[in-house]
Each structure stands twice: as structure tokens, then as C-alpha cells.
Image (cartoon, coloured by chain):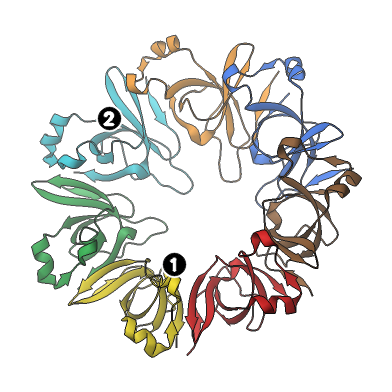
Chain colours: A blue, B brown, C red, D yellow, E green, F cyan, G orange
Amino acid sequence: MNIKPLADRVVIKMIEQECKNEFGLFLPDSAKEKPQVAEVVAVGPGTKDIKMELKVGDKVICSKYAGTEVKLDDVTYSIMKQNDVLAIVE
Amino acid sequence: MNIKPLADRVVIKMIEQECKNEFGLFLPDSAKEKPQVAEVVAVGPGTKDIKMELKVGDKVICSKYAGTEVKLDDVTYSIMKQNDVLAIVE
Amino acid sequence: MNIKPLADRVVIKMIEQECKNEFGLFLPDSAKEKPQVAEVVAVGPGTKDIKMELKVGDKVICSKYAGTEVKLDDVTYSIMKQNDVLAIVE
Amino acid sequence: MNIKPLADRVVIKMIEQECKNEFGLFLPDSAKEKPQVAEVVAVGPGTKDIKMELKVGDKVICSKYAGTEVKLDDVTYSIMKQNDVLAIVE
Amino acid sequence: MNIKPLADRVVIKMIEQECKNEFGLFLPDSAKEKPQVAEVVAVGPGTKDIKMELKVGDKVICSKYAGTEVKLDDVTYSIMKQNDVLAIVE
Amino acid sequence: MNIKPLADRVVIKMIEQECKNEFGLFLPDSAKEKPQVAEVVAVGPGTKDIKMELKVGDKVICSKYAGTEVKLDDVTYSIMKQNDVLAIVE
Amino acid sequence: MNIKPLADRVVIKMIEQECKNEFGLFLPDSAKEKPQVAEVVAVGPGTKDIKMELKVGDKVICSKYAGTEVKLDDVTYSIMKQNDVLAIVE
């Protein structure tokens, strides 16, 4: 099965707490549940005004509360607008 | 009878809980009533600013609370703006 | 007497509960007072940005709470923006 | 004395409850104080985006709560944007 | 001293309660503190989108609560956007 | 040290209560803490939409609550958008 | 590891309280936790509407509450839109 986001949306796969250490990124305690590291798994076609900058495989930082969560085969995905993705982690 | 959505709206037919399993898509418990899988049954003409990306027959994920529900011959439809549809499921 | 809506507004005549059955459209109980079937009786000239898609005689679905109600010779009309009309019923 | 509305505003003169009957228009009880029949007595020059559709002498339906009331020689006028006028009554 | 309003703002001088009678304009009791007659004493240069329609010396009606009051030599002025001026009184 | 405001922002230096008398400007008691006289000390480059009308040295009236205060060598500055400056005092 | 902000966002590194003295900038007590001096460490590509004025190495003043904080190797970064940066300190 495949999720194709519409317009300027992307589908991202949440990365486990443990993986965050692998990236060397530690989120501050007080904001523990806010920013999240995730991997882009699908990218929409964009809109007339918004060109897609993200591509499949990008590791990104985004707010946990942005987007809509869906769960597939026990993996949690989130569908959100590209504009709710804050940055790419390289 | 036929429902023709105006502007950038689409009419979608809710798919039963059971059908979701068929798609292999499980929504997280905490959000059980939020995202929904549905089938597009009618597509509006679009607007000057919004081109319609959806077509009849598309399986889509959308928020249950988006759109306005109407019931016809015991089937529940929802009329919503294309922008409230999150993604196509293939 | 005649009501000519301004700009992108339309005047619609509410259709009685009984007539809804005639259309074969049953609104869900929980939303019994929300969507309504109505008939367009007057259409404004549109605006620079909004072309009128509706014409006199169209049967439409709209939210009961959209628009402003006026009563003339015991018939209830509602003046609303075309954008608050959800779909045409054919 | 003369009131010249600015931009896309119009000045309307409220028409007494009794006159409404003359128009054959009866407002629903529950909304008794909302829509009002009024006569346009002055029209602003419009703006770059809004062309004036109303002219002096037009009978219009508008919301009582739109606009700002002023009283002159015991007549109540209201200064409101053309967009707050719902329809012309002919 | 001179107050030069920026952009699409004007400076107006409030006219005393007594002067309102001179204009023959009586504000309704319930709205006694809302609309006000005032005299334009300075006009800004306008913006790319807003051309100034008001000129120094215009008698205008405006909402008392629009704008920011300043007091100079015991005269109360108000600096407000032209769009908050409702009408010119002639 | 130098503060260079970005975009359509300006940096202004608050002028002491005493200086206001020097300008002959008295703010009304009830609004004592709202409008303020200040001196422009830095001007941003403007944006595509907003041309800077203010220049260094201008005496301006602005709302005390507009902008963000910073303190340098015991002088209080405020960084605000040009649009929050109400008028130039000459 | 590298954080590449998207669109018109920048990544800034908060500068310690002590460093602020080095800049000679003292924030007012009452607003102690609001404006902050920070150093730009990454700049996004900008958008169709927003050209990036900031460059890596710029010392900036920004609101502490703007942006999203992330922590890496015990350094606190904030990802925010360029428009939430108030000024450059030179």
C-alpha cells in the first residue's frame, strides 16, 4: 500500500527516541514532546505557490503536533504540510 | 439522484471500519475518530486558484470532522473541500 | 416583489422536510438541523473573483446556519454567499 | 446637511416596521431584530477592488447590526460597507 | 508644532458635543459615545494600495474608539487610518 | 555597538516624560501610558511591499506597547515595524 | 551533523547571558526573558516572496519565544522564520 500526499503535503515516518541519539540530537527536556526527528517517505506534487523542497529519504525536524497521524503495519506516519517541516538534518 | 459538488469541493463515501483492514491501514487508538479512509464519488469543477487533483474512485485519507455529512439510501457521504483531503491511498 | 442578491450571493427557498424524501436524501439524525436541501430562486451578478456557477431552479445542499433568513408570504428564504452552497442535487 | 460615505460605504435610512408590510416582507420572529429593510440615501465612490452596485433610492435588506448608526432630524441612518448589504428588494 | 501622519493615517480634531448640534447631527442615546464628528487637520501621503480621499478641513464622522488620542494645548486629536473614517459631513 | 533593524522595522529611542513638554505635547491622563514620543535612531531597508518613509532623527508618536524593548547603556530602545509608528512630529 | 532550515527559516545559536554584556546590551528587567541576542548558524533558501537578508555569523536580536528550540551537544539552537528576527547587532 502507498500513501500519496496531496498538494504541498508530505508523509513522514516518526523516528524512535533511540534513533535520535544516533543523530546526536537531543531535544530539551521542557520541550521533550514538541520537535521530532522524522524521515520523509512521500512528497506531494506541490502547488502553484509552493515548490516542494523536500525529497523522499530526507531526515527532518518537525513539530509533533503538526500534521495528522496514521498508523500502518505498526509504523506511525504523519501527513503534514511542507511548511510545518522546520529543517532538514544532514 | 446525483450530488454535484461546487467549486473545489468533493463528495466522498465513508468506508466502513472493516474495509480499513482490507487497506492494511490502522489508525492509532487515540486518534480513532479523526482520520478516515473514504472513496471519492464526485469532484467539483475547481476554482481559478485550485485545480482538482482528485478523481472519482480515488481512495483518500481525510479528517472525519472536515466537511458536511449527508446520508442517502443509508450511505453516509461527506462534502468537503479538496484541501481537506490529506492523501490518496493506492 | 423581487429579491436581487448583491455580488456573489444567492437567494434560496428552503424545501420542506417532506420534499427531502422526494429527493431520496435523508440527512443523518445527529446533523438533522445542519445540511438542508433548497432551491435557488435568485442569483447575484458575481464579483471580479467569483463567477456564479448556480442558476435559478438549481436544487442545492447548504448549511442551515449559513446566510440570513427572510420570510415573504410565509415562505422562508435565505440569502447566502454562493461559497456557502455545498453542492447541486440533480 | 449631507453625509458622503467614504470608499465602499453607503448610507441607508432605516424603514419603519410598518413599511415592511408595505413591501410584503415579513421577517421571521426568531430573527426579528436581524435583517432590516432600508433605503439607500448616499453611495461612496467605491475602491480599487469594489465597484458600487447600489444607487440612491435602492430598497435593500441588510443586517441591523452591520454599520454604524447616526441620527439626524429624528431619522436613523446607518453607514455600512456595501458588502454588508445582502440584497436589493424591487 | 505639527503632526504629520504616516501612510494612510489622518489626524482629526474632535468637535465638542455643542458643535454637533450646529451640524444638526444627533447621535442616538444608546450609541452616544460611539460615532463622533471631527475635523481633519492633517492627511498622510497614502500607500501603494490606498489613495487619500480626505483633505484638511473635511468634517467627518468616525468611531470614537478608532485611532489613538493625543492632546496638544488642551485640544484632543486622534490619529487613525482613513479607513476608520466613515463619512464626510457637508 | 549598532542595531540594524531588519525589513520594515525601525529602532526608536524613547524620549523622557520631561521632553514631551518641550514638544508641547500632552497625552491625555486616561491614555497616559499609551502613545509615546520617540526619536528614530535606525531604519531598516524596507520590504518589497513597504517603502521606508521614516529617517534617522525623525521625532515620532508611537504606541508604547508596539515593538520590543531593548536597553543599551541605560537608554531604552524599541524595535518596531514602521507601520506601528503613527505620525511624525515636527 | 548539520541543520538546514527550510524556506525562510534560520537556525540561531542562543548566546549566554554573559556574552550579552560583551555586546554591551542589557535587556530591561521586566522583559528579561523576552528579547535575546543570538548568532545565526544556518540560513534557509528563502521563498518566492521573502529574500534572505541574514547570513551565517550575524549577531541578531530575537524574541525568546519565537521559533522552536532544539538541543545538540548541549548547545541550544532555535529554528525560526527570518521575519521573527528583529535586528542585526554590529
Q: Quadrant of residue E85?
A: bottom left
Residue D82, given in percent of the width and then of the height, sits at 41, 71
Q: What separation in Å lies between label 1 and label 2 (alpha carbons)?
A: 38 Å
* Residue E58 relative to residue F41: left or right: left
Residue at x 21%, y 48% (from the top left corner): E69
* Residue D25 relative to residue C16: left or right: left
**Residue at mark 1: chain:** D
Give above or below for D32 relative to E12: below
Q: Amino acid at mark 1?
A: Lys
Residue D45, given in percent of the width and then of the height, sits at 36, 73
Residue F86, given in percent of the width and then of the height, sits at 29, 45
Tag 2 residue? F13
Give above or below for A7 relative to C88: above
Q: Which mark is residue D48?
A: 1
Residue at x 11%, y 59% (from the top left corner): E16
Residue C23, given in percent of the width and then of the height, sits at 74, 77
Q: Amino acid at mark 2?
A: Lys
Q: Residues within 10 Å of mark 1 (few under 14, many from 20)?
A: few
Are callouts 1 and 2 both on one chain?
no
- Residue sitting nearer the eye, F62 or A63: A63
- Residue sitting nearer the eye, F45 or B44: B44
